[in-house]
Image (tube, rainbow, N blue to C red):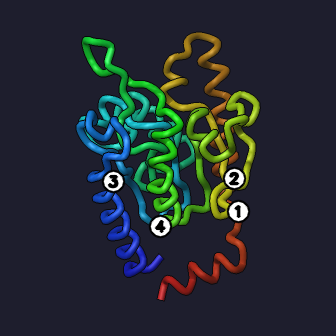
């Protein structure tokens, strides 16, 4: 990818992130500390999409920086990818919370929050134009594959995502961390199989038309 194109995409992401920072469509826009737009290579071949920011992400304004983020880094490394090689984001850009009277706790985003935030996710996909979308966890997977999608039955399978992008789902790192003993070992094997499928897809030759576009962008 040419430096000019990389710079154009980086500026587009910066501008889009500023729009998200000012967004108050949802109540969580007023309770969050920072919006968490996403980060990574603006020309990434893989976009990793999670559910929503947690407490640490909200505090730092970055996606996947807690324990789940550490595991995600290891998952990527298992298929020879560094965090910098991909673009990481979430279906919603603000931390969904529940006030239990003592503190704000994490919760899953509700349908309206995901609907309000979807244009921001779609714009990210349009800017970055990844070859692969890796959805982490059921909420992220359902946002692409529909509400009837089952993460236990559908993980590791390829689907056609936005703009025809190859899309695959696996378990969320936070969910993996909650497993113990034999269940943890079994889940690691499943996730590694999913990741190997991602690596194999990434290693496939570019289609002739796409390869020509990439070549043209180098000059």
Residue 91 percent coordinates (x, y)? 49, 44
Residue 93 percent coordinates (x, y)? 39, 45
Helix, strand or loop under label 2: helix
Which of labels 1 and 3 is toward the front? Answer: 3
Residue pushed farthest bottom? 219
Instruction: Name the residue tied to disc 2.
Output: 200
Q: Please tell me which residue is depicted at 61% across the width and 26% down the height of the picture.
A: 188
Helix, strand or loop under label 3: helix
Residue 15 percent coordinates (x, y)? 31, 65
Q: Please tell me which residue is depicted at 38% across the width and 50% down the height of the picture.
A: 38
Instruction: Name the residue tied to disc 4.
Output: 127
Residue 204 numbered tag: 1
Give how far apart the Cα atoms at labels 4 and 1 are. Answer: 22 Å
Residue 20 numbered tag: 3
Looking at this view, is 115 or 123 the one in front? 115
**Of label 3 and label 2, which has the lower sequence position?**
3
What is the crowding at mark 4: few (fewer than 14 residues within 10 Å), some, or many (at least 20)? some
**Of label 4 and label 1, which has the lower sequence position?**
4
Looking at this view, is 120 or 127 the one in front? 120
Q: Please tell me which residue is depicted at 35% across the width and 40% down the height of the picture.
A: 94
Give how far apart the Cα atoms at labels 2 and 4 are. Answer: 24 Å
Residue 36, placed above or below residue 104: below
Q: Are marks 1 and 2 in contact (CB under 8 Å)?
A: yes
Which of labels 3 and 2 is toward the front? Answer: 3
Q: Are marks 2 and 4 in contact (CB under 8 Å)?
A: no
Which of labels 3 and 4 is toward the front? Answer: 3
**Of label 3 and label 4, which has the lower sequence position?**
3
Q: Are marks 3 and 2 in contact (CB under 8 Å)?
A: no
């Amino acid at each position: 990818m040419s430096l000019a194109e990389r710079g154009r995409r980086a500026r587009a992401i910066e501008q889009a992130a500023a729009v998200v920072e000012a967004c108050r469509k949802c109540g969580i826009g007023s309770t969050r500390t920072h919006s968490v737009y996403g980060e990574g290579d603006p020309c990434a071949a893989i976009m990793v999409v999670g559910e929503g920011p947690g407490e640490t992400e909200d505090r730092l304004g970055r996606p996947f920086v807690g324990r789940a983020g550490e595991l995600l880094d290891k998952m990527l490394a298992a298929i020879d990818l560094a965090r910098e090689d991909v673009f990481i984001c979430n279906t919603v850009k603000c931390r969904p919370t529940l006030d239990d009277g003592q503190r704000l706790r994490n919760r899953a985003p509700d349908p309206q929050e995901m609907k309000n935030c979807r244009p921001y996710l779609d714009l990210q996909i349009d800017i970055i134009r990844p070859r692969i979308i890796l959805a982490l966890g059921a909420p992220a997977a359902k946002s692409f594959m529909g509400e009837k999608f089952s993460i236990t039955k559908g993980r590791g399978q390829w689907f056609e995502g936005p703009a025809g992008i190859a899309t695959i789902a696996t378990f969320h790192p936070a969910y993996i961390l909650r497993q113990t003993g034999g269940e943890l070992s079994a889940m690691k094997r499943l996730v590694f199989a999913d990741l190997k499928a991602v690596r194999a897809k990434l290693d496939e030759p570019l289609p002739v038309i796409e390869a020509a576009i990439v070549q043209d962008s180098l000059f």
